[in-house]
Amino acid sequence: MNFTDRGNGDTESSHLNEENERIITIINSALNVPLILTSILGNGLVVAVIVKNRSLQSPSMIFLFSLALSDLLVGLVAQPLYIANTLTTNIYFLKLATGMMAFFVCGVSLDTVTAISVDRLMALTYHLRYPSLVTPCRVRYTTVLIWLSKVLTSSLYLWKMRECHFVVAFTTVMCLLISTFSYLKIYGIVRRHRLRIDAQQLAVRGNCSPENVAHMARLRKSALNMFVFYIVLILCYFPMYILSTLHGASLLNWETKWDFAHTAVFMNSSINPVLYCWRLPELREAIVKMLRKIFCVQTHQN
């Protein structure tokens, strides 16, 4: 009698756990739907605006174009694959495609943010030689190399998953270290420059060049903007990285409720366009101008 009751209890508990996991899966998938829409609309506008406005095609904007394009692919491809994979079971090809695409687009985003941090460090360190050192052509080559390297890394997922996880973990750590080092150096440069300007202004009024002060102020603001993007990316990626590391080290089993960490990663692609419009006035003005043209054309047609 006791064994029968225990067996019935285990069966009921198993059914309850499966039902809870199903509810969590549905909620998680539902959360991704509005993120898909905002990611496609927001990043699509950013990509279109940068392509159509040559004045926005500076080296830093080319990097932002690469970041927005990878975020656009998150909404167009990665998230729909993820939702389809979570709502279905035992479809091996779908699982492979989801993992490969997630590694690809997220890897491009992380590498691009790292390249942006190095770019801002060079702009402050070599602010007089920066235009000759970092040209739009060189930045385009760099972005192409980033995308090609992520194609190779993500394709490794097809036949050597463990090696792919190791490569992704290693490159993630390296990107975080490089970005953190770059922003620490940027903070030191900005702090020293601020102290030098204050000392010159106290010693002799008007001794420092207004043009130089304005130029450095623009570089500081640009570095701060990119630092905001970096911090948001870290906040979105951190839960996923910790859980994946612990799971890869066999310290814990993956649970369905932890799938929300994937959604946090995808959320970064929806947040970035908002950050662009908040922190970059020239990009915000171009987007507003494009939206006005679109709505005016639709109104005229109606």
Image (tube, helix red, strand yellow):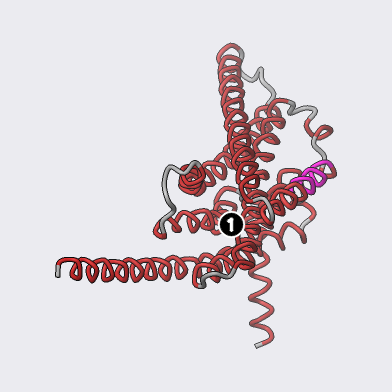
List x then y, in percent, for residue 21.
38, 66
List x then y, in percent, for residue 168.
62, 44
Q: How many marks?
A: 1
Name the foreground residue: 301 vs 31: 31
| Residue positioned most to the left | 1
Look at the image and tell me in which quarter the C terminus lies: bottom right
- Assign a secondary structure to mark 1: helix
Q: Residue at x 57, y 14 (%)?
A: 199
The correct choice, above or below, for 53 with respect to 167 in the image is: below
The correct choice, above or below, for 43 with respect to 187 in the image is: below
The secondary structure making up most of the magenta span is helix
Name the foreground residue: 154 vs 15: 15
Q: From this viewpoint, is residue 158 visible?
A: yes
Compared across the picture, whether 167 is left or right of 11 comes to: right
List x then y, in percent, for residue 254.
44, 53
Q: Which of the 4 image quadrants contains residue 179?
A: top right
Look at the image and tell me in which quarter the N terminus lies: bottom left
Disc 1 marks which amino acid? Pro
List x then y, in percent, for residue 2.
15, 66
Crowd rating for badge 1 (residues with CA inside 10 Å; few <14, some 14–19, many 20+):
many
Q: Residue at x 65, y 55 (%)?
A: 105
Q: Which residue is mark 1?
A: 273
Q: Which of the 4 image quadrants contains residue 229?
A: top right
Compared across the picture, whether 18 is left or right of 97 comes to: left
The residue segment tinted magenta is 138-146
Q: Residue at x 58, y 57 (%)?
A: 273
Name the foreground residue: 138 vs 243: 243
Q: From this viewpoint, is residue 41 visible?
A: no
The correct choice, above or below, for 245 with respect to 130 in the image is: below
| Residue positioned most to the bottom | 302
